[in-house]
Image (cartoon, grey):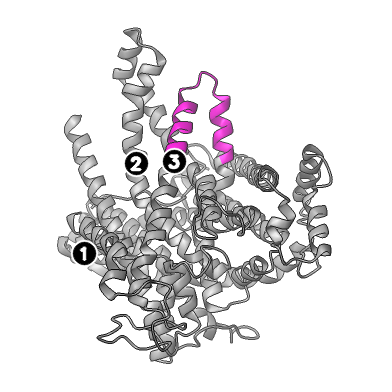
Amino acid sequence: MSELPQPAAPASAFAAPGGGSRTARVAKALGTRLAELIAVIVVLVVLTSLVVRLLPGDPAQAILGASATVERVTQLRAQLGLDRSTLEQLGTSLGDAFQGDLGTSLAQSRPVSEVLWEAFPVSLSILVLATVIALLAGIPLGLLPALRRSRALARLMAMLAVVFLSIPAFVVGLYLILFVAIDWGLAPAGGWGTGWPGNLRYAWLPALALSFVLIPSIVRAVQRSSIDALSEEYVEAARARGVGELAIATRHVLPNVLLPLITLVGFNASWLLAGTIVIEAVFGIPGFGQVVQSAVASRDYPLVVGATLFSGVFVILVNLATDLLQALADPRVRVRS
Amino acid sequence: MAVGIAIVAAIALLSVFAPAIAGDGPDRLIGAPLQAPSGEHWFGTDALGRDVFVRTFVAARVDYLVAIFGTLFSLIVGTTLGTLVAMARRPVWGKLLMRVTDGLIAVPFNLLILVIVLGFGTERDVLGLPKGLPGVLVAVIVVGWSIYARLARAEAMTLRQREFVGAARLMGFSKRRIVGRHILPTVILTTGTYAVADTVMVIGLLAGLPFLGAGVLPPTPEWGTMMFEGRGVLESAWWVVVFPAAALVATAIAISLIADGLLDRLGAGEEAGR
């Protein structure tokens, strides 16, 4: 079974993993990600001001719709900088964005960043929980075919991975609500609690749905690296010494799997966050999903743009963390430094 | 791969003939709301008493349309830009392109699309397309080209180093001929195969938008809008969500099978050629 290209997975910052000293790697990662951070902010600010300026008609009116009040339209016009020249407005928006000022929400009349920081921990918790579930399910599933040394099983898993990789997480979520929540009554069909750990009751089902985004890739990555590792001489030697299959799996195969997994999870952050947002809207969870949902409903353009910028910066910081974690976890670097 | 093509073809055919089979249009209120599936209405009726069978398949028109045109334009724009940049004499253009795509790829695509859809407005009327659709199409293309450009650039950069390109250059062929005859055909093979798999992503993206308050506006049937409407009545009427969801899943599986088959065939061809 061949490999489909991964959706929107940026490459690692390192050209050759394992090359160079650790300080060199860390410096390179910092440089690359800093350039990306600047790129995200510049590209988004330019894009959003171009979108509203290139189209015919009054952009503020088009965004807010015919039923909008005059004050709302004037307020948005001012925030979009339509009363100033394009260059002047671009300069101010860029300056503001780099200082973390994302403007004021039209509907909620408070800073956009305040709204986002309130919702962010909720989204992050779903994201983290989904990653944990995906790792707990994906690693054993990926190790299974190699350990049983069954080609049929391997092909079946690869097939399932292709199928599930293509199904959007929110569709899985809808089916889970239908069966697990409504038919079996094992979880609430949506909503959110008042605090942890009570929230877990609400969080596990959406997180499970989201984990389906990641499980197929994890299974495939584990399967590939475990099959490679099993053909190594040290595994054969361990087997000759009479080491059990389970011990071989955990002590000799698993470490080889970790590095690719860090890369996989980290560089799928953008894709995962996209899934989280829709899942939250489906399950009625007060994270980014609901913020965006209500912002779109009230045509709160600054809030939607702010959420987009915030997410872009978050993804790049996750990528940076991934780079650093890779440098830390790679024993080839550890030995040298 | 044959199975995949059969499923897609069946859904495409039904999207044309479903109204005739059931004898009702997608927007007609044909009976009591939320009737369970029966001999008369195979997939039941929705909250407004419309036939879910007809709507599920008519919806495929919009979903397939966006998937095909969205990826096709992204493919053309991205492949052209990526190849041009890789062949450009000055590396500045390549660096600029990489930075721009870095920015686009880091952001969750559905948010990026929402920004453009909102900025575009849902009330613009373009070419008589269903309300909300033009904004989504524009957004998919504005965002989607970035991955193709990166793929094309990487592929063209490796091709440029290959002997047959060097030979063509030594034989004095023009740059235009080298790009057109020797580089572009191979680059398109790579980006085109990705495009097939990408149509699934586009359909998933489109279907997720109604939950965020955007996407194709009702009453035009689209899988996402139908699922969104069905989410509210999920506890009493599972069929309103399950059938459009099943159609989407069937399409997704079918296209993955096709893409996977293409990739296998391509890989085999490349190995034989080396």
**Is residue A133 in view from this perspective?**
no
Residue B148, disc? 3
Toward the viewer: A329 or B67?
Answer: B67
Q: Mark 2 Cα within 10 Å, few/some/many (few <14, many 20+)?
A: many
Secondary structure mostly seen in the magenta stretch: helix
Residue at 79% of width from left, 45% of height from top?
A95
Q: CA distance from mark 3 to mark 1?
A: 30 Å
Query: Helix or strand or loop: what does disc 2 sit on?
Result: helix
Toward the viewer: A165 or B234?
Answer: B234
Asked where in the image residue A63 lies, by quadrant, the reply is bottom right
Check residue B95 for magenta coloring: yes
Q: Mark 3 Cα within 10 Å, few/some/many (few <14, many 20+)?
A: many
Callout 3 and callout 1 share a chain: no
Q: Mark 1 Cα within 10 Å, few/some/many (few <14, many 20+)?
A: few
In the picture of the structure, the residue carrying the numbered disc 1 is A156
Q: Position of residue B273 (x, y in %)?
A: 19, 30
In the picture of the structure, the residue carrying the numbered disc 2 is B192
Identify the magenta region.
B74-100
Q: Position of residue A247 (x, y in %)?
A: 29, 67
Callout 1 and callout 2 share a chain: no
Q: Position of residue A32 (x, y in %)?
A: 59, 40
Callout 3 and callout 2 share a chain: yes
Quick check: B112 left or right of A244? right
Quick check: B126 left or right of A180? right
Check residue B184 for magenta coloring: no
* Badge count: 3
**Dot 3 falls on which chain?**
B
Q: Which amino acid, mark 2?
A: Gly
Mark toward the viewer: 3 or 1: 3
Residue at 56% of width from left, 73% of height from top?
A281
